[in-house]
Image: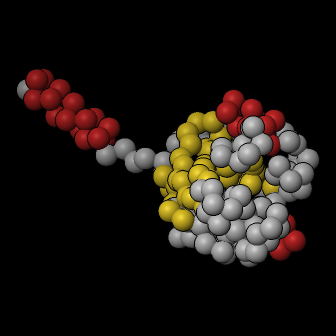
């Protein structure tokens, strides 16, 4: 009898582990190729500069806030280019609507902070790679164990340092842009 209970308990635990959900990021706007909707309307690009819709699911237990970044490692700067940096998204929020990166529209959840991008201003700035060059854009959502004690003027690498020191889990998608 004891052996049957032990085996049953073990099978139950194995079943729980094998069905654990993965922290996942999705977008109805990007994942593949950027469109003119996401492209910048600056730097010789003529897009609409609309941040993509993003949603995530299955954050780990203990998540206190989320952060989202969009980073272009291929930018000809020597250190990449931060296109969007958002942190202190409340832990009960699992989606950013398309266009939420426009700071003038106040579409972010209460408490969320859009920090400076590499343009020196907060909010979303879309891709604008040099003509003929395809760039890879990494979109990442971070599940954090706290809220960051930073403000919108914090430089992106500094925010990244704090993100990485507070991360419980992260999920990413990639999109490409070429003009």
**Residue visible at 76% across and 69% down?**
45
Quadrant assignment, res 62 = top right
What colour scheme does the image use? secondary structure
**Residue visible at 54% across and 65% down?**
33
Q: Quadrant of the C terminus?
A: bottom right
Q: Is residue 12 above or below residue 91?
A: above
Residue 55 in the image: x percent, y percent?
A: 56, 62
Residue 60 in the image: x percent, y percent?
A: 52, 42
Q: Along the horizontal axis of the image, is 115 left or right of 65?
A: right
Residue 103 in the image: x percent, y percent?
A: 84, 66
**Residue visible at 72% across and 62% down?**
128
Q: Is residue 94 visible?
A: no
Q: Is residue 81 visible?
A: yes
Q: Along the horizontal axis of the image, is 94 left or right of 153?
A: left
Q: Is residue 91 above or below residue 95?
A: above
Quadrant assignment, res 18 = top left
Residue 106 in the image: x percent, y percent?
A: 83, 70
**Residue visible at 25% across and 41% down?**
15
Residue nearest the viewer, comparing 28 with 82: 82
Quadrant assignment, res 108 = bottom right
Q: Quadrant of the N terminus?
A: top left
Q: Along the horizontal axis of the image, is 138 left or right of 7?
A: right
Q: Is residue 60 above or below residue 45?
A: above
């Amino acid at each position: 009898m004891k052996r049957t209970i032990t085996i049953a308990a073990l099978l139950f635990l194995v079943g729980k582990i094998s069905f654990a959900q993965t922290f996942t990021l999705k977008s109805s706007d990007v994942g593949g190729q950027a469109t003119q909707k996401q492209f910048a309307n600056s730097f010789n690009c003529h897009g609409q500069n609309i941040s993509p819709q993003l949603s995530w699911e299955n954050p780990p237990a203990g998540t206190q806030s989320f952060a989202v970044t969009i980073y272009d490692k291929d930018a000809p700067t020597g250190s990449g280019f931060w296109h969007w940096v958002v942190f202190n998204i409340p832990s009960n929020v699992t989606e950013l609507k398309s266009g939420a990166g426009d700071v003038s529209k106040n579409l972010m959840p209460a408490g969320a902070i859009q920090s400076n991008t590499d343009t020196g201003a907060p909010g979303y700035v879309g891709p604008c790679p040099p003509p003929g060059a395809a760039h890879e854009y990494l979109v990442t959502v971070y599940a954090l164990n706290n809220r960051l004690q930073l403000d919108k003027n914090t430089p992106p690498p500094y925010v990244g340092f704090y993100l990485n020191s507070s991360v419980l889990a992260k999920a990413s998608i990639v999109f490409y842009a070429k003009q």
